[in-house]
Image (tube, helix red, strand yellow):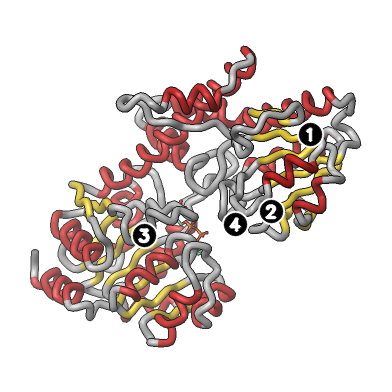
Amino acid sequence: MNTTGEALAGKIRSKQAIVGVVGLGYVGLPLAVEYGQAGFHVVGIDLDESKTARVNQGDSYVGDIQSSVLAPLVAEGLLRATTDFSAIREFDTVNICVPTPLRKTRDPDMSYIVTACKEIAKYSHPGMLVILESTTYPGTTDELVLPMLEESGLKAGEDFFLCFSPERVDPGNVKYQTKNIPKVVGGTTAACTELGRLFYEQALEHVVPVSSTQVAEMVKLLENTFRMINIGLANEMAIMCDSMGIDVWEVIEAAATKPFGLMPFFPGPGLGGHCIPIDPFYLSWKTKQTGVEARFIELAGSVNGQMPHFVVAKVQNALNEASKPVKGSKILIYGVSYKRNIDDIRESPALDIIHLLKRRGAEVWYADPYVPRIRLGEEVLDAREGCAAVGDADCVVIVTDHAAFDYAALVRDARLIVDTRNALKGIRSDKIFRL
Ligand SMILES: NC(=O)c1ccc[n+]([C@@H]2O[C@H](COP(=O)([O-])OP(=O)(O)OC[C@H]3O[C@@H](n4cnc5c(N)ncnc54)[C@H](O)[C@@H]3O)[C@@H](O)[C@H]2O)c1
């Protein structure tokens, strides 16, 4: 490593390095807090003024970060947030944690990364470590980010250091959080990887260096593609079991008793969230350019995409039993976030299910202790108080199995229940229709 790298390594080891985080969302804010707790001075940059204001008030908007943890860091001057990118001038390290959505055409939307990198390039200086954490297609760091940063005349591996490190945070997971999820990191050069490893070792428990940025990018896509395809298999199993009158949940639980060779995945109302429904398509988009078709991804995408329709068909069947048409029925959706105990509704299948039911003429309400209001196109829906609405609904659809729901009261008061999560496991009743 050259003297620029050695000087940066010294600052990182002594915790004198100023740590910058660009994008203070579900990924960036926990990372900023972790480095503040490790004793670094951290500055977060976000375009959204309401977020930077809340951080500076010690008021967390991310479920996994308690304000009681954030506020003392702000009070001690270890963490602050700003919308002013010129703060980058002072940074020794900068982690990019901005969104990477898909366009409607299922092409990667790199615009957030490009915007962030333009600002970093504008204020970059020798001796900086830049780490991209946003999930993206293999090649992004070296093909897109590197040329933007080198436009300033600085050279990667010599004047500044560049890595990719996939973010693996699992919102709502109390056992595994930013600190104890192993961190994979790969750099543009060996010196870049070494500085990336050193940086993460200061605040996180376990670091896994890999040989290149491309390997690190691909690691994340393998992880999420693995989940997406296995969920697709579980969903297809659910559809097959349903056609034969077999309880898929019992099948999976019994199969999972095999002590080797099987990892259980469970069916559900469809994929949701910012990662699993999106990331595999980054990979299929990229491999198409090399002439390779990602057939498993396309197939799993198609099976998973059918699940909201399958749930609506279940609702229709349940109402048929009560001789009621979907049209005009009052349907209560229990849980709209994409998974249990969190407030994130991005890509949530609940939104598709509500849309499909409304299109069939149903009157649809929802209850969710984490989500007070949702927007569906032009329409805004406010959450109902779960227990109160159950008695008025013709059918309740459990889409998200939040722990806070009173399932005993639900079973007691509901007329019909469609349970897409096996939340009512072990309860036998003619009014319960399981996936
Ligand atoms: N949320 C997860 O569970 C999760 C898990 C693993 C990986 N990821 C990946 O991490 C990345 C970030 O995801 P997230 O969930 O934190 O997103 P998020 O939407 O919660 O946060 C992103 C933040 O970046 C800000 N932002 C956008 N453009 C910016 C710019 N040019 N400069 C500064 N700030 C900007 C937004 O205002 C927002 O606050 C994505 O690539 C995502 O796929 C997310």
Tell me which numbered mark, 2 or 1, is placed earlier along the sequence.
2
Residue 8 x/y as whole percent: 17, 73
As measured in the structure, the alpha-carbon distance from the residue carrying label 3 to the one carrying label 4 is 18 Å
Sequence order check, earlier mark of 1 and 3: 3
Residue tagged by mark 4? Answer: 343
Q: Is residue 249 above or below residue 40?
A: above
Cβ–Cβ below 8 Å for labels 3 and 4? no
In the rendered image, which quarter contains the N terminus? bottom left
Q: Amino acid at mark 3?
A: Thr
Q: How far is disc 1 from disc 3 in space, using C-alphas? A: 40 Å
The image position of residue 96, as x and y in percent, is 38, 62
Relative height, residue 94 to residue 261 (above, below): below
* Pointer 2 or 3: first along the chain: 3
Pointer 1: what residue? 416
Which residue, given by chain and number where applicable, does mark 3 sit on? 178
Considering depth in this image, is 409 or 99 the residue closer to the camera? Answer: 409
Q: Is mark 3 within 8 Å of ligand 1?
A: no
Residue behind mark 2: 368
Question: Mark 1: which secondary structure?
Answer: loop
